[in-house]
Image (tube, rainbow, N blue to C red):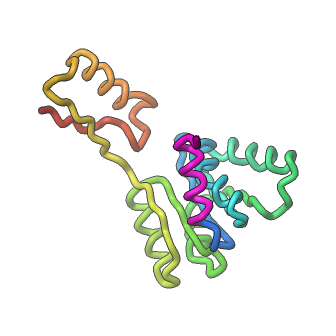
Amino acid sequence: MFSSYVLVLLILILTLKHYTLYLYLCCKNYPLLMATWKVAPALAAGCTAVLKPSELASVTCLELADICKEVGLPSGVLNIVTRLGPDAGAPLSAHPDVYKVAFTGSFETGKKIMASAAPMVKPVTLELGGKSPIVVFDDVDIDKAVEWTLFGCFWTNGQICSATSRLLIH
C-alpha cells in the first residue's frame, strides 16, 4: 500500500511530465524543504528544472545542487540561479523557454510572477502568504487547543504559511 506521500509524488510526476523546463522560485523559510518538494517531482518526470532560491537563503539550495552532482544527476538538469528577484526571478518567469512556473512567497511578488507569465499563458502555481485558521469545536480540550494554537502561530516566529493566525471557535 502506498503512503500518501508516494501517491502525491506520483500525481505530481504525471502532472508535470509534459513540461520540459520547470521554474521554481523558492521562499526564504524552509528553502531546502520547499525546493525538494517542488524540484523532485519535476526531475522525476524528466523535466529540466531551474531553482531560484530567495537571496536571503541560498546556501542550502546550492548544497542540494552539489548533492545532485555527487549522485550523478547530469549537468544542466537542475540549475540554481542566485540573484535578486527582479534581476533573476522576473526574467525567468517571462522567458519563453520556461513552460511551468511555481512560486512560494508573498502576495505582491506572486502578482508580479503571474503577470510576467500571463502573455504566454503558461501554467503558474502560487502559494502566497497565509492565514491558516484553526477550528475549535465545543467538545475539545480547551487547554490543548490553546497550547496547539500558540505553537502553530509562534513556531518559527510566525514565518510560516500555515501559522494558526486565525481562530474559529464554536
The answer to which quarter of the image holds residue 107 is: bottom left
Work out whether residue 123 or residue 57 is closer to the camera in this orientation and state it: 123
Task: Place residue 28 in its image quadrant.
Answer: top right
Front residue of this view, candidates 40 and 3: 3
Q: Residue furthest front?
A: 1
Instruction: Residue 56: tell me if it is visible.
Output: no
Residue at 55% from the left image edge and 67% from the top image edge: 101
In this rendering, position of residue 33 left or right of residue 116: right
Q: Is residue 62 left or right of residue 34?
A: right
Q: In the figure, 129 relative to 13: above or below?
A: above
Judge whether 1 appears above or below 100 on screen.
above
Residue at image x 31%, y 35%?
164
The quarter of the image holding the N terminus is top right
Residue 18 placed where, x, y %? 63, 73
Query: Can residue 32 be seen from the camera position used here?
Result: yes
Q: Nearer the viewer, residue 140 or 4?
A: 4
Residue 11 drawn in magenta: yes
Residue 85 highlighted magenta (yes or no): no
* Quadrant of the rendered image containing residue 44: bottom right
Q: Position of residue 153 (x, y in %)?
A: 34, 31
Please give the range of residues in magenta.
1-15
**On screen, 42 above or below 93?**
above
The relative height of residue 24 versus residue 70 in the rendered view (above or below) is below
Q: Predominant secondary structure in magenta?
A: helix
Counting labels gives: 0
The location of residue 33, given as percent across then percent down, is 60, 42
Q: Residue 53's x, y, as percent?
A: 62, 52
The residue at 46%/79% (across/down) is 118
Residue at point 70% right, 59% down? 43
